[in-house]
Image (cartoon, coloured by chain):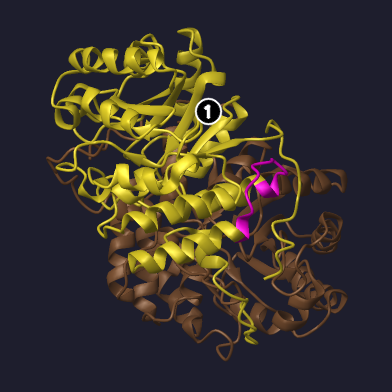
Chain colours: A brown, B yellow
């Protein structure tokens, strides 16, 4: 395969540049079976930065009891040093205890993880929606006092495995509650991957009406139903400029049957490279990083681009018609 | 998972209905390792029609020497009887000999398979681009004389494994050459799956300038680089109303390294169902058909929707944040 591909052709309604919010080291690795050593995690982040990614969520200070894969968050950040600090190197904090640990590690950006549905809040946060907002309030207030950048994830925005459909206005309510705490950025999570393009447009419009513009909104699609890239394209055309993705398609959601995980960063970069949208990412370096991480995890990358660029095209001589 | 999902929300610029041109029995099965018996092939077509698909390419009259998987084309059509006839039940014919066999089987629609590149023409058709058009001329003329509907596939429209990029005007030239023979419909093939949305728009615009409107143009995307659904969405927004897809994601292209095959019909239907675009397809019946075919082939379906709808959501109790 000539890497003269994809051919460049600007697409209608796409911006000049997009910020890829890389979640592989956190959302990816926390959902992998294999637990990789802290130095491999730090090396992963370094390689992602070397490949041109600017915004990388490095780890999570959730309780090791819930996510043993990321129990070494402090160790990873110590290894990264200055590279792990900065407003574009957030860490996930579930509560004030997590924030304390994050502050001890010297981070300058955090992310909280809310829910659009009552059931998921109860199951994932151990409390109702209203109570979870109360829990996050001091986390955000103290983060702001410490000068941190704060992102609010909202999960189950496009469907819930227990509740089924989730009304757009209900999602908007949850988003407003968290953003009203003073968060800098919102990330709309299609946790189970059931969203479709019109639904993406409807939610972005509802948020706009409620005062949360696309300039403060990122999108986080899972590819469980194969919709992630089409939904991303739709969000970009609606003005979104921050897209979450996971290098190599690492991770998934244990609540979604046969989850295929996050949108693969490589598949996103392929589309954006084709459209001439700047991301700063060197796709070949990223693919090499995914191959290296796949070796660490002992299984192939689910990214289609990583698979496709796995080698030269077989020079098969048989007709295919 | 509640099948109340996907939630319905109309998407900007999509039509009220789309014709899915189902290629599973031909493009899908010809590229599978396993060869299934003629009666299973006929049963597959019947199940696809029962699931609501209207347009199904049933088989191919290419030489059994090249595609032994479909050597039983006449037998499949005999089994199908009236269901295999009609202007929405095309068969692939590579040349006049293939047309002879197709006519003997009583078909009322055929498809020819051209190329956008010289190299692929040489390798797949055994002659240059100009010579291949000469070869197709009597096939189309005789088809018209017999009152058949004729489709023209053009492969390698968005990149070629040997030549790399393929200029849009070169593709348009190839399309015009075939359509000028008198074909009723064009199908733009992204045979190696490297196309991206802007490229899709550019090619459709070039064709429009050359007199081939979106009303005569279908799209045929492979998902090798994960771009198929985003490209399809783009084509629909540009006015295309015929989309090729393969139930269960059957098949692939042996020339594309790690080919992941055609766009899965289920993944397309999920998106269109979400947007409220009519296809006539019962998604659950289609998924059941893919599971049945996967059993015949002895391997799981690569369709993400088929995987995701494989059973109920595991009621896992662990947090995922």
Circle 1 crowding by C-alpha within 10 Å: few under 14, some 14–19, many from 20: many
Q: Which residues are magenta?
A: B273-284
SS state under label 1 = loop
Closer to the camera in the image, B67 or B318 = B67
Q: What residue is rendered at 74% in x and 55% in y?
A: B7
Residue B87 vs A138, above or below: the answer is: above
Mark 1 — residue? A11
Q: Is residue A42 left or right of residue A317?
A: right
Residue A264 vs A5, above or below: the answer is: below
Q: Residue B316's x, y, as percent?
A: 62, 85
Residue B227 visible, this angle: no
Q: Is residue A185 left or right of residue B66?
A: right
Closer to the camera in the image, B128 or B82 = B82
**The quadrant where residue A248 appears:** bottom left
- What secondary structure prevails in the magenta region? loop
Q: Residue B15's x, y, as percent?
A: 68, 31
Q: Residue A95's x, y, as percent?
A: 71, 80
Q: Residue A157's x, y, as percent?
A: 73, 60
The quarter of the rendered structure image containing the N terminus of chain A is top left
**The quadrant where residue B215 appears:** top right
Closer to the camera in the image, B244 or A143 = B244
**The quadrant where residue A184 appears:** bottom right
In magenta stretch: residue A270: no
Q: Is residue B141 left or right of residue A90?
A: left
The quarter of the rendered structure image containing the C terminus of chain A is top left
Residue B284 visible, this angle: yes
Q: Is residue B187 left or right of residue A152?
A: left
Q: What residue is rendered at 51% in x and 44% in y?
A: B229
Q: What residue is rendered at 36% in x and 18% in y?
A: B143
Chain letter of the residue beneath label 1 in the structure image: A
Residue A69 vs A150, above or below: the answer is: below
């Amino acid at each position: 395969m000539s890497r003269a591909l994809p051919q460049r052709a600007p697409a209608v309604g796409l911006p000049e540049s997009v910020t890829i919010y890389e979640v592989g080291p956190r959302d990816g690795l926390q959902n992998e079976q294999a637990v990789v050593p802290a130095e491999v995690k730090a090396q992963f982040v370094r390689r992602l930065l070397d490949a041109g990614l600017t915004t990388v969520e490095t780890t999570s200070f959730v309780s090791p009891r819930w996510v043993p894969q990321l129990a070494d968050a402090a160790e990873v950040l110590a290894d990264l040093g200055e590279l792990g600090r900065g407003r574009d190197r957030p860490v996930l904090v579930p509560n004030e205890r997590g924030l304390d640990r994050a502050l001890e590690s010297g981070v300058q950006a955090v992310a909280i993880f809310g829910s659009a549905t009552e059931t998921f809040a109860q199951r994932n946060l151990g409390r109702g929606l209203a109570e979870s907002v109360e829990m996050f309030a001091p986390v955000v207030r103290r983060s702001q006092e410490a000068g941190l950048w704060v992102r609010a994830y909202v999960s189950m925005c496009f469907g819930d495995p227990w509740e089924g459909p989730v009304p757009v206005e209900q999602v908007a309510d949850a988003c407003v509650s968290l953003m009203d705490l003073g968060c800098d950025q919102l990330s709309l999570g299609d946790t189970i991957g059931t969203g479709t393009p019109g639904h993406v447009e409807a939610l972005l419009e509802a948020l706009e009406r409620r005062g949360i513009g696309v300039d403060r909104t990122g999108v986080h699609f899972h590819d469980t139903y194969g919709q992630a890239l089409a939904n991303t394209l739709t969000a970009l055309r609606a003005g979104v400029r921050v897209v979450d993705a996971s290098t190599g398609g690492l991770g998934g959601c244990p609540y979604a049957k046969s989850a295929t995980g996050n949108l693969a960063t490589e598949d996103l970069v392929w589309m954006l490279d084709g459209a001439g949208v700047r991301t700063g990412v060197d796709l070949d370096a990223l693919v090499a990083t995914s191959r290296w991480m796949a070796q660490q995890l002992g299984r192939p990358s689910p990214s289609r681009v990583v698979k496709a660029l796995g080698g030269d095209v077989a020079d098969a001589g048989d007709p295919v018609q």
